[in-house]
């Protein structure tokens, strides 16, 4: 039987409505489960394009309507984005930063970025504890699991960046999110990447995962003071480790 339809007994319209709602919810949950598995497979990393819908329906065994419902949920969670005429992409829709911010990003240093992070990210964690939706918190917990399951430093870096950005999103302040994206663009620069890789030992990665879990837990408990404090401690630890790596390289 096609998943979009079900045979039901003849009842009044009011009797049928809960049945069809239940069917719709099961269909959506099934689509999300299959799309989750597809994204978790590693076949489509962040910024890659997903296959066309007609291919996904066949690969995943979903109807077109069920697939679109699942994609709608993932887009709402910030896990995919769509571009008319180009397709569906994994990750957040890239923002076009103002030209002045682009220039600043290309001329700044990791040390300056960490100073700004220490000023802004604890504030973002505080606001997230006050404003995050249940969906925001659920997504943070998902990103925590993905980062903890990462098998190599490069993959861990990607999930680490997604988690920090999710905290920024959960603050629900578009201006602060734009500022976060401006300094977070440093992650794509080669100098930053080499420095991060040099500083990211297995022991430090394990420590950072504990930090992440602690501040996400504080956000989930709606404890703004604790969330801010734990995020500050985390950024201070990252800064100390990076500075140590810089001095070691020198």
Image (spheres, rainbow, N blue to C red):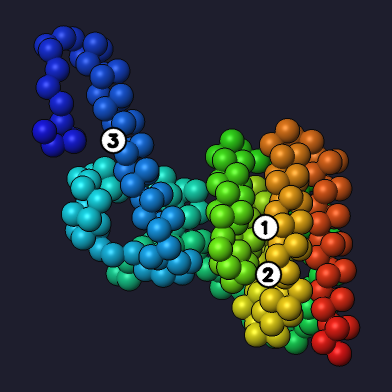
Residue depicted at 80% across the width and 52% down the height: 231
Residue depicted at 72% across the width and 70% down the height: 200
Q: Mark 3 points at which residue?
A: 27
- Name the spot of residue 80 as percent of width and height, x first: 44, 58
The tag earlier along the polypeptide, 1 or 3, is 3
Callout 3: helix, strand or loop?
helix
Which of the 4 image quadrants contains residue 168?
A: bottom right
Q: How many marks?
A: 3
Q: Name the residue under label 2.
A: 184
Left or right of 89: which side holds 185? Answer: right
Few, some or many residues within 10 Å of mark 3 (<14, 14–19, 20+): many
- Name the spot of residue 213 as percent of width and height, x first: 70, 46
Which of 245 and 70 lies nearest the eye of the viewer?
245
Q: Mark 1 points at which residue?
A: 164
Determine whether label 3 and label 2 are within 8 Å by CB.
no
- Name the spot of residue 217 as percent of width and height, x first: 72, 39
Which of 56 and 208 lies nearest the eye of the viewer?
208
Q: How far apart are marks 1 and 3 (CA)?
A: 32 Å
């Amino acid at each position: 039987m096609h998943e979009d339809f079900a045979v039901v007994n003849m009842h009044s319209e009011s009797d049928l409505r809960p049945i069809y709602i239940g069917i719709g919810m099961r269909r959506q949950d099934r689509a999300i489960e299959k799309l989750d598995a597809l994204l978790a497979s590693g076949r489509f990393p962040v910024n890659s394009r997903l296959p066309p819908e007609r291919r996904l329906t066949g690969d995943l065994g979903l109807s077109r309507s069920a697939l679109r419902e699942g994609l709608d949920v993932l887009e709402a969670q910030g896990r995919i984005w769509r571009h008319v005429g180009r397709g569906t992409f994994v990750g957040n829709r890239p923002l076009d930063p103002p030209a002045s911010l682009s220039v600043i990003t290309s001329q700044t240093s990791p040390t300056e970025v960490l100073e700004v992070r220490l000023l802004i990210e604890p504030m973002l964690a505080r606001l997230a504890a006050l404003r995050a939706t249940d969906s925001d918190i659920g997504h943070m917990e998902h990103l925590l699991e993905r980062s903890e399951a990462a098998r190599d430093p490069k993959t861990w870096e990607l999930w680490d960046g997604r988690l920090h950005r999710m905290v920024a999103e959960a603050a629900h302040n578009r201006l602060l999110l734009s500022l976060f994206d401006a300094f977070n663009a440093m992650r794509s620069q080669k100098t930053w990447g080499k420095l991060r890789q040099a500083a990211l030992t297995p022991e430090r990665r394990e420590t950072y995962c504990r930090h992440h879990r602690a501040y996400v837990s504080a956000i989930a408990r709606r404890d703004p003071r604790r969330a801010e404090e734990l995020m500050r401690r985390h950024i201070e630890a990252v800064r100390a480790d990076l500075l140590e790596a810089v001095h070691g390289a020198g």
